[in-house]
Image (tube, rainbow, N blue to C red):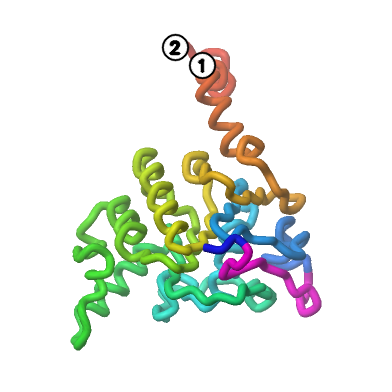
Amino acid sequence: MDLRDPYLRGVELDRTGIPSFRQYPFHLGAIRSLHRLELHPQVTYIVGDNGAGKSTLMEAIAVAWGFNPEGGTKNFSFATRPSHSALHEHIRLVRGSRKPRDGFFFRAESYYNLATHMEELDNDFSFGPPIRDSYGGQSLHEQSHGESFFAAFLHRFGGQGLYILDEPEAALSPLRQMAMLARMRELVEASSQFIISTHSPILMAYPGATIYQLTADGIELKAYEETDPYIITKQFLNNRDKMLNELFGSGHST
């Protein structure tokens, strides 16, 4: 992809129509301080602790783009339980001049619902090929959670696409997370753009990516080595016994 011409250049918060910054989700520090996020033309990461607003922001971007709140392509319109926030109504997308040919919103927490919906559609009469053919030809419910996750990344993502992924590492082993990095490289070289929220220091290691860390005070641009997932994981691996003693109390022994 031309580094000067991404599919999605940035995300802005239209603050004029927001009813109150004391209400969810506008009371969240990251949302309250949001004015504009510049997105990398290849890979942008959104990281932060639980409750910081990562999934809320990712969902709003995806819905504003036209994706179903529970995930999938723009062609999916099911709703298991409407629970998305109104944030997307106040998100303004700054689009590039080029339009993607492909796209997918991946949500780890609702992927089961997406797989169920696809299976129901395949069970209905259709003149076209089964949807599962686009995911490797096997029912996603007949695979392990991790296998079904990876099947989407490997088979469904076809390139020249905008891919918004919310915690895709949820069911992936460290080895599969590294395999996903390799798959991302293939797709980036095929003119794709990624926006990814993650807790994984492996998955967020894509070279040259832009990383935003959400906190209670706002949004910070970070280098990979400055992010909490990297720092905490490194500290734990390098000082495992010391950190376990602190977590368990002085009675712990190795």
Please tell me which residue lies in front, 36 or 19.
36
Secondary element under disc 2, as helix, strand or loop, is loop
> What is the number of the mark on residue 241?
1
Magenta residue span: 4-20
The answer to which of marks 2 and 1 sits earlier in the sequence is 1
Drawn side of residue 157 relative to residue 47, left or right: left
On the image, the x and y values in percent for residue 53 come to: 63, 57
Please tell me which residue lies in front, 208 or 174.
208
Q: Amino acid at mark 2?
A: Thr
At label 1, counting other C-alpha atoms closer than 10 Å, the crowd grade (few under 14, some 14-19, many 20 or more) is some
Can you see residue 109? no
> What is the number of the mark on residue 254?
2
Instruction: Give the tally of numbered discs.
Output: 2
Residue sitting at x 52%, y 78%: 66
Is the residue under label 1 in contact with that under label 2 (CB below 8 Å)? yes
Drawn side of residue 25 relative to residue 252, left or right: right
* Up/down of 99 relative to 173, above or below: below
In the picture, residue 125 is in which quadrant?
bottom left
In the picture, residue 160 is in which quadrant?
bottom left
Quadrant showing the C terminus: top left
Please tell me which residue lies in front, 28 or 253.
28
On the image, the x and y values in percent for residue 154 come to: 32, 57
Residue sitting at x 22%, y 70%: 133
Residue sitting at x 42%, y 64%: 110
At label 2, counting other C-alpha atoms closer than 10 Å, the crowd grade (few under 14, some 14-19, many 20 or more) is few
On the image, the x and y values in percent for residue 60 come to: 59, 70
Please tell me which residue lies in front, 175 or 100.
100
